[in-house]
Image (spheres, rainbow, N blue to C red):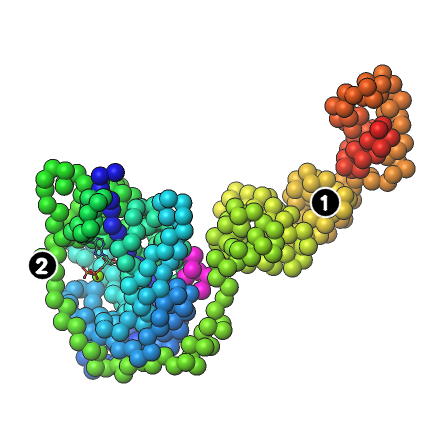
């Protein structure tokens, strides 16, 4: 390991407010191009922006969840540049007073130990429109539906050490924004976007190498791939005696490489100045207190609670808290099902299989948590076997979610016999049939128990409760 990589990430998160950042246009993805626009989002002369309280709330929520300091007096600034997707000719953003400073995201580092990636800042700004270069042979088309959508940009310290750490950092942030319900975290649709600043340096060096900014990764896996490629490319350049130039590069997902877009030597001077059309907004103690109170349980806290209060394994707790919808379902499930471990097994077993096979989400699972809990209770009190419950009964319930699990068990003849008299009858019949095997068992060949259980099950036509049969057999033999 002659070299080490230094990576800082800039993540743009679209806030899912009802309206845009500075006007009343709807903030929605996937509508027909240029239908969610107005003179304000198109930057017509004489129009004035106004504040969006929900956007400020969302940014504050995120800052609190990431342990940041929240700035009390916030100014907006103008970042000036000319581009077709920016009709005003400037972007309203925060320059000197980002709404959040400090804070951190905790990940599992390369060495398996917890590692904090510290944040430099989170600032609020507006999104640009979207240029489409591939929809028309001759022209670039522009959709302004996205122009003015509220964003926060989360800027990390250069403390990420690998593609894998970047992947984890992104996963944590995506999970968090989903729990906070401020963004759907969909990188494929661009509601969360990540630029990676990558540099490499000699392992023992104290001075960072020149950084290269990589853009256009539209999934977490691609961020990881792009970083891994870029680290390798830079090491090879240095080994060849070349100098790394400060530039912006674009990731090509099909080729798995990065190519130069523009050099930083020609980086624009954005001529930031205070936005004159918006007064500063003040985050009051009252506002902050209210947001703190309303903050939902964060995934890290729930992950611990599922292990300590619900007795789940670290793995199960991890899978359940990874997706907010799954966690919500589980918490509702356990309100009806006292067997918390069984609820987790059913959720991660048969229910998850159903989701995978049908490409559905948990909210589309047709059987209520109440009915599922009744089914689990039938297994727990020995009325039906687990096999019958997760097989035939579940299948019937999926077809008819309103039916009663016990009624289904009856109708399909799946109720187990745990009546001691009936079972004792079967047992004596079996033991009388195999006197020599009984002798062998008594002489120490304990493995024969399975044979006796099997015979009893056969006699009962599969209706005997195998647990009860085992118990009764042992007590009559030992
Ligand atoms: P710029 O002014 O070029 O945008 P910033 O100082 O604002 O640079 O930093 C932008 C991002 O680049 C931050 O996430 C920061 O952590 C990261 N960064 C800064 N220096 C380096 C470096 N030498 N290597 C990798 N990332 C870096
Ligand atoms: Mg920057």
Q: Which residue is mark 1?
A: 379
In the image, is 406 to the left or to the right of 363?
right
Circle 2: element type: helix
Task: Pick the quarter of the image with the N terminus.
Answer: top left
In the image, is 138 to the left or to the right of 301?
left
Q: Nearer the viewer, residue 442 or 246?
A: 442
Q: Which residue appears at 85% of the width and 16% of the height? A: 436
In the image, is 415 to the left or to the right of 236?
right
Q: Which residues are magenta?
A: 174-181
Q: Which residue is mark 2?
A: 266
The quadrant of the picture showing ligand 2 is: bottom left
The reply to whether dot 1 and dot 2 touch (C-beta < 8 Å) is: no
N-term-proximal mark, 1 vs 2: 2
Does the rendering let one see residue 253? no
Q: Is residue 339 above or below residue 122?
A: above
Image coordinates for residue 250, horizontal then vertical, percent: 21, 49
Q: Which residue appears at 30% of the width and 46% of the height? A: 162
Q: Which residue appears at 63% of the width and 49% of the height? A: 341
Cβ at disc 2 under 8 Å from ligand 1: no
Q: Which residue appears at 23% of the width and 71% of the height? A: 95
Image coordinates for residue 260, horizontal then vertical, percent: 15, 48
Image coordinates for residue 10, horizontal then vertical, percent: 28, 58
Q: Is residue 2 above or below residue 185?
A: above
Instruction: Classify residue 148 by image quadrant.
Output: bottom left
Circle 1: element type: helix
Instruction: Classify residue 337 by image quadrant.
Output: bottom right
Q: CA distance from mark 1 to mark 2?
A: 70 Å
Q: Nearer the viewer, residue 232 or 425?
A: 232
């Amino acid at each position: 390991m002659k070299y080490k990589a230094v990576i800082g990430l800039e993540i743009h998160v679209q806030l899912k407010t009802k309206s845009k950042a500075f006007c009343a246009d709807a903030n929605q993805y996937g509508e027909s191009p240029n239908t969610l626009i107005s003179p304000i989002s198109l930057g017509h002369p004489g129009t004035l922006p106004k504040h969006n309280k929900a956007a400020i709330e969302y940014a504050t929520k995120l800052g609190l969840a990431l342990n940041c300091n929240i700035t009390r007096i916030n100014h907006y600034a103008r970042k000036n540049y000319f581009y077709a997707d920016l009709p005003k000719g400037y972007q309203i953003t925060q320059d000197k007073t980002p709404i959040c400073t400090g804070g951190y995201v905790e990940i599992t580092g390369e060495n398996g130990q917890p590692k904090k990636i510290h944040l430099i800042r989170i600032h609020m700004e507006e999104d640009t429109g979207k240029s489409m270069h591939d929809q028309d042979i001759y022209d670039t088309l522009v959709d302004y539906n996205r122009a003015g959508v509220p964003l926060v940009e989360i800027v990390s310290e250069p403390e990420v050490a690998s593609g894998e750490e970047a992947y984890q950092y992104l996963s944590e942030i995506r999970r968090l924004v989903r729990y906070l319900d401020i963004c759907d975290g969909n990188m494929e649709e661009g509601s969360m976007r990540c630029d990676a600043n990558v540099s490499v340096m000699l392992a023992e060096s104290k001075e960072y190498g020149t950084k290269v900014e990589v853009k256009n990764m539209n999934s977490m896996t691609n961020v990881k791939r792009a970083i891994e490629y870029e680290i390798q490319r830079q090491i090879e350049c240095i080994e060849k005696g070349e100098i790394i130039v400060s530039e912006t590069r674009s990731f090509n997902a099909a080729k798995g490489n990065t190519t130069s877009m523009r050099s930083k030597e020609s980086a624009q001077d954005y001529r930031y100045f205070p936005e004159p059309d918006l007064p500063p907004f003040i985050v009051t103690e009252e506002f902050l207190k209210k947001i703190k109170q309303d903050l939902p349980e964060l995934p890290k806290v729930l992950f611990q609670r599922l292990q300590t209060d619900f007795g789940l394994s670290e793995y199960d707790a991890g899978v359940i808290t990874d997706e907010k919808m799954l966690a919500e379902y589980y918490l509702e499930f356990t309100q009806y099902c006292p067997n918390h471990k069984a609820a987790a097994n059913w959720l991660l077993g048969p229910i998850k299989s159903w989701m995978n096979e049908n490409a559905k989400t948990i909210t589309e699972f047709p059987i209520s948590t109440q009915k599922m809990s009744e089914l689990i209770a039938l297994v727990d009190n020995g009325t039906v076997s687990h096999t019958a419950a997760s097989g035939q009964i579940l299948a019937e319930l999926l077809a008819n979610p309103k039916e009663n699990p016990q009624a289904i068990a009856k109708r399909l003849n799946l109720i187990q016999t745990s009546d001691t008299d009936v079972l004792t009858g079967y047992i004596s019949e079996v033991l009388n049939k195999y006197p020599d095997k009984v002798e062998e068992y008594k002489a120490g060949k304990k493995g024969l128990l399975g044979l006796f259980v099997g015979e009893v099950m056969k006699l009962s036509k599969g209706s005997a409760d195998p647990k009860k049969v085992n118990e009764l057999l042992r007590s009559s033999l030992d």
